[in-house]
Amino acid sequence: DQQVKQNSPSLSVQEGRISILNCDYTNSMFDYFLWYKKYPAEGPTFLISISSIKDKNEDGRFTVFLNKSAKHLSLHIVPSQPGDSAVYFCAATGSARQLTFGSGTQLTVLP
Amino acid sequence: KAGVTQTPRYLIKTRGQQVTLSCSPISGHRSVSWYQQTPGQGLQFLFEYFSETQRNKGNFPGRFSGRQFSNSRSEMNVSTLELGDSALYLCASSLGPRETQYFGPGTRLLVL
């Protein structure tokens, strides 16, 4: 039972354009959501997070949007850069405190 | 501030052996969590330690165990290794439970 789903295994965008990565969840007890970026042979790097009391959080080129009624969140990267090419994981947590991860989306930013 | 460190980075073992992996959290972080990453199952939670106590455990067999020391450093142990235990084992630390987790580079375990 996948509680956090990233339905797009891959995404390609042109440098300078917007990258939109999507994530859906099923567990209504999740109240804190995070995005991590991962390069091969490295651990995930924390990017940005959002609490369920908010619907938007921005940090530089990264913005996360949360739609609680749809149980959907998205990560926007503007403008996209070639160095952003990596696997992006969505993660969620609730009172249990452990992170539940999605399966990841491979983002490729084309020069 | 130094990040999360994990040792060793790479390990090759044979079936039936046991292995111990080590994790040093970011200075000041008292919570340590362990995750397993495999191509088939993705990133899965193993267990979480805070103040030397296991606070939460994922759905893994009893062959997987861990502990945390008074300096917050943590070890995980896998006994009677199976081929399916081949994975990247990731450690993450946070200031406390429910705080943002920061990951180490992982230990790549190959079981032959």
Image: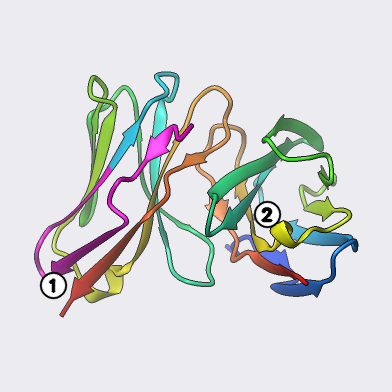
Q: Which residue is mark 2?
A: B25
Q: Is residue B88 above or below residue A72?
A: below
Magenta range = A1-22
Mark 2 residue crowding within 10 angstroms, few (<14) / some (14–19) / many (20+): many
Q: Is residue B97 magenta?
A: no
The answer to which image quadrant residue B106 occupies is bottom right
Q: Which residue is mark 1?
A: A15
Q: Determine if marks 2 and 1 fall on one subunit.
A: no
Question: Amino acid type of disc 1?
Answer: Glu
- Tell me if label 2 and label 1 are in contact, CB under 8 Å: no
- Left or right of A63 in this view: B48: right
In reply to whether residue A7 is colored magenta, the answer given is yes
Residue type at numbered disc 2: Pro
The residue positioned 22% from the left and 55% from the top of the image is A60
Q: Chain of mark 1?
A: A
Quadrant containing the C terminus of chain B in the rendered view? bottom right
Crowd around label 1: few <14 · some 14–19 · many ≥20 (10 Å):
some
Mark 2 and mark 1: span between their CA atoms? 36 Å
User: Which quadrant of the figure has residue A33?
Assistant: top left
**The N terminus of chain B lies in quadrant:** bottom right
Q: Give the image location of residue B96, x and y in percent.
A: 62, 36
Q: Is B32 drawn above or below residue A98 in the view shown?
A: below
Q: Position of residue B32 (x, y in %)?
A: 68, 45
Q: Is B4 in front, or is B17?
A: B17
Coordinates of residue B49 in the picture (x, y in percent): 73, 38
Q: Secondary structure at mark 1?
A: loop
The residue positioned 47% from the left and 71% from the top of the image is A40
Chain under callout 2: B
